[in-house]
Image: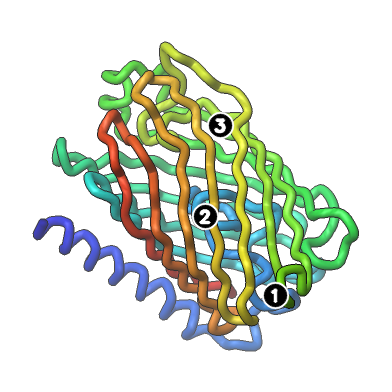
């Protein structure tokens, strides 16, 4: 338990330094062409979107004549595992998003830490979240490299690297629900990743097929949003890998800082059931 508290404290110190570095920059340099909260938050794999699911929106508030730089740190704690994910995103003229995330996954029953790096690219293909008739559509790629492959291979994984490809569609409807704005996203992902890649890629029960991911959020006002996400996942290793669910609250005090709190239900991880808990993420945009 002391190790857990120290881990949380250390990661939040890192998180605070990231945010302070953003806040210390001149405010006039911030890309701020989009409406507050419309880019969403930062996903645990480093892409712009929700917490569990990448959305069609690109990270940051850059418009077609701006560049935006974002950074984030996330701490997720469930019954037997803790995940820390930190990284950065570059939005080039609201057309291309380039992202990087470093993940550390603490496995309490084995007293070990798994890690992986994720490099992502997202291309906006069509539309605008708010202004186009049809949803905004983006194509994304996340290349994952597992830095600790021994456990993955022992469980039957075929590789320590893999590439996810997803297509996402997002739309914001003004005043749709009793006068509140409603945002939805649907993503389709091709993946061979086991537990997002932390347990390697592929396996004896290879189910590298298309997986659906869905998010819905209601904007209670211009600073606060509540919502839920659902992410399907393959079960390549035969460990009853569960689909993921969350319920979240995101606070946007301004265009420079975002705080997200979520309740997580990750089901069974590595054959250990009942993995529920909490998720806290802090991000900044420049």
Q: CA distance from mark 2 to mark 1?
A: 24 Å
Q: Earlier in the sequence, mark 3 or mark 1?
A: 3
CA distance separating discs 3 and 1: 37 Å
Residue highlighted by disc 2 = 43
N-term mark: 2 or 1: 2
Disc number placed over residue 180 in the picture, else none: 1
Q: Quadrant of residue 160?
A: top left
Quarter of the image with the C terminus in it: bottom right
Q: Residue furthest front?
A: 178
Dot 1, crowdedness within 10 Å: few (<14), some or many (≥20)?
some
Compared with 42, 102 (above or below) is above
Judge from the rendering whether residue 99 lies leftward or rightward of residue 36; answer left or right.
Answer: left
Q: Secondary structure at mark 3?
A: strand
Q: Secondary structure at mark 2?
A: loop
Q: Position of residue 52 (x, y in %)?
A: 50, 50
Q: Which mark is residue 225?
A: none
Query: In this view of the protein, which residue sits in the foreground, 241 or 158?
Result: 241
Q: Quadrant of residue 8?
A: bottom left
Residue 275 picture location, percent across and down: 30, 44
Above or below, 166 against 194 in this view is: below
The residue shown at (42%, 34%) is 242
Q: Position of residue 105 (x, y in %)?
A: 30, 45
């Amino acid at each position: 338990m002391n190790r857990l508290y120290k881990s949380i404290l250390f990661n939040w110190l890192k998180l605070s330094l990231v945010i302070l570095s953003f806040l210390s920059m001149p405010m006039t340099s911030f890309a701020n062409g989009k409406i507050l909260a419309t880019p969403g938050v930062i996903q645990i794999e480093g892409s712009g979107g929700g917490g569990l699911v990448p959305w069609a929106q690109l990270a940051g508030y850059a418009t077609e004549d701006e560049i935006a730089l974002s950074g984030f740190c996330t701490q997720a704690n469930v019954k037997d595992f803790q995940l820390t994910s930190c990284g950065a995103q570059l939005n080039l003229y609201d057309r291309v998003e380039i992202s990087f995330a470093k993940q550390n996954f603490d496995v309490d029953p084995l007293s070990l830490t798994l890690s992986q790096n994720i490099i992502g690219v997202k291309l906006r293909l069509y539309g605008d979240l708010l202004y186009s008739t049809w949803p905004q559509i983006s194509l994304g790629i996340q290349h994952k490299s597992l830095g600790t492959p021994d456990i993955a291979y022992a469980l039957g994984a075929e590789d320590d690297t893999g590439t996810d490809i997803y297509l996402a569609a997002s739309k914001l409807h003004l005043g749709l629900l009793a006068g509140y704005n409603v945002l939805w996203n649907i993503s389709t992902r091709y993946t061979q990743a086991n537990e997002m890649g932390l347990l390697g890629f592929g396996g004896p029960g290879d189910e590298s097929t298309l997986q659906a991911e869905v998010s819905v959020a209601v904007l209670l006002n211009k600073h606060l949003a509540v919502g839920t996400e659902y992410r399907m996942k393959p079960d390549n290793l035969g460990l009853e890998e569960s689909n993921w669910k969350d319920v979240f609250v995101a606070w946007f005090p301004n265009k420079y800082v975002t705080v997200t709190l979520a309740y997580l239900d990750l089901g069974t991880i590595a054959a250990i059931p009942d993995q529920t808990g909490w998720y806290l993420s802090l991000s900044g945009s420049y």
